[in-house]
């Protein structure tokens, strides 16, 4: 049972272990509370994570925060991680908070776009203390690029659904074909694992410097899998 009644800007909210609860709690309670605070109104950058955690602690026990439900893709997700996600996503999507740098936000100034990318949101959540840092490393390419090995492959990370993440990344791509997911690996410490895998691929001379972004490598799926395996042994 919550620590006290959950009153939002749209009325009472019943606690349930679900994505819907996390969305409503974030949009109609946490974000309004943040915008009422002195740190927000000062216009100066503030750390978002401690602020949303303090508000959540007023209403939900740690057990309620850590309770998990299954997402449509079968992956368990905690109520707290859902709140963390929606505070950032709804906040930036509705121009309520403005991204400054990793973990830091401020009142929107109108001087820059108020959104972070999906990748930045995921990496922030994955690196927060107490967050569920497991996730997926994925490798995808486009059919046009698959010729003789090695060929260009993009290596990225997500804490959510691989197919959804890849589809989001490819919106507006110059390629007309659908991306082909070559393989994905469930890993611990996903953000650290991604950076390390990409770093080792660069050190091995596989980085495709003329590709948009910094995550394309001319390599093979077997080579990526070998490196992922090595990194996971070191980070367990």
Image: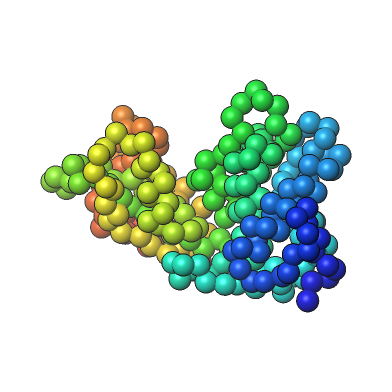
* Res. 129 in view: no
Task: Give the left or right position of residue 103, taking residue 145 as reference.
Answer: right
* Residue 151 point in image, percent of width and height: 21, 44
Using the image as rendered, state which of residue 189 and residue 174 is in the foreground: 174
Task: Give the left or right position of residue 116, taking residue 15 as reference.
Answer: left
Which residue is at a point 33% across and 41% down the rendered structure image?
A: 216
- Quarter holding residue 22: bottom right
Task: Give the left or right position of residue 85, taking residue 55 as reference.
Answer: left
Using the image as rendered, state which of residue 24 and residue 193 is in the foreground: 24
Q: Which quadrant is home to the N terminus?
A: bottom right
Residue farthest to the front, as pictured: 10
Which residue is at a point 77% across and 47% down the rendered structure image?
A: 32
Q: Is residue 17 above or below residue 197?
A: below
Colour treatment of the image: rainbow
Which residue is at a point 42% across and 51% down the rendered structure image?
A: 165
- Count all numbered tags in the image, as a single digit: 0
Using the image as rendered, state which of residue 216 and residue 160 is in the foreground: 160
Residue farthest to the top, as pictured: 111
Task: Give the left or right position of residue 80, taking residue 208 as reference.
Answer: right
Residue farthest to the left, as pictured: 148
* Residue 80 point in image, percent of width and height: 66, 63
* Residue 29 point in image, percent of width and height: 76, 54
- Quarter holding residue 16: bottom right
Q: Is residue 22 above or below residue 42?
A: below
* Res. 86 in view: yes
Which residue is at a point 78% across and 59% down the rendered structure image?
A: 11
């Amino acid at each position: 049972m919550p620590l006290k009644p959950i009153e939002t800007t749209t009325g009472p909210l019943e606690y349930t272990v679900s994505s819907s609860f996390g969305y409503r709690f974030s949009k109609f309670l946490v974000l309004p509370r943040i915008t009422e605070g002195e740190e927000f109104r000062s216009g100066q950058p503030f750390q978002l994570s401690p602020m949303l955690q303090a508000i959540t602690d007023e209403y939900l026990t740690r057990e309620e925060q850590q309770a998990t439900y299954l997402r449509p893709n079968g992956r368990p997700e905690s109520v707290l991680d859902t709140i963390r996600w929606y505070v950032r996503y709804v906040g930036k999507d509705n121009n309520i908070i403005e991204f400054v740098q990793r973990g830091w936000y401020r009142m929107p100034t109108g001087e820059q776009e108020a959104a972070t990318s999906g990748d930045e949101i995921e990496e922030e959540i994955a690196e927060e203390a107490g967050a569920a840092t497991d996730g997926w490393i994925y490798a995808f390419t486009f059919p046009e690029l698959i010729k003789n090995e090695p060929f260009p492959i993009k290596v990225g990370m997500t804490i959510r659904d691989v197919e959804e993440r890849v589809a989001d990344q490819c919106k507006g791509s110059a390629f007309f074909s659908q991306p082909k997911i070559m393989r994905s690996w469930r890993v611990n410490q996903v953000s650290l694992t991604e950076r390390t895998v990409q770093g080792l691929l660069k050190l091995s001379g596989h980085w495709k410097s003329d590709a948009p972004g910094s995550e394309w490598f001319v390599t093979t799926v077997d080579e990526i899998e070998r490196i992922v395996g090595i990194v996971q042994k070191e980070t367990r």
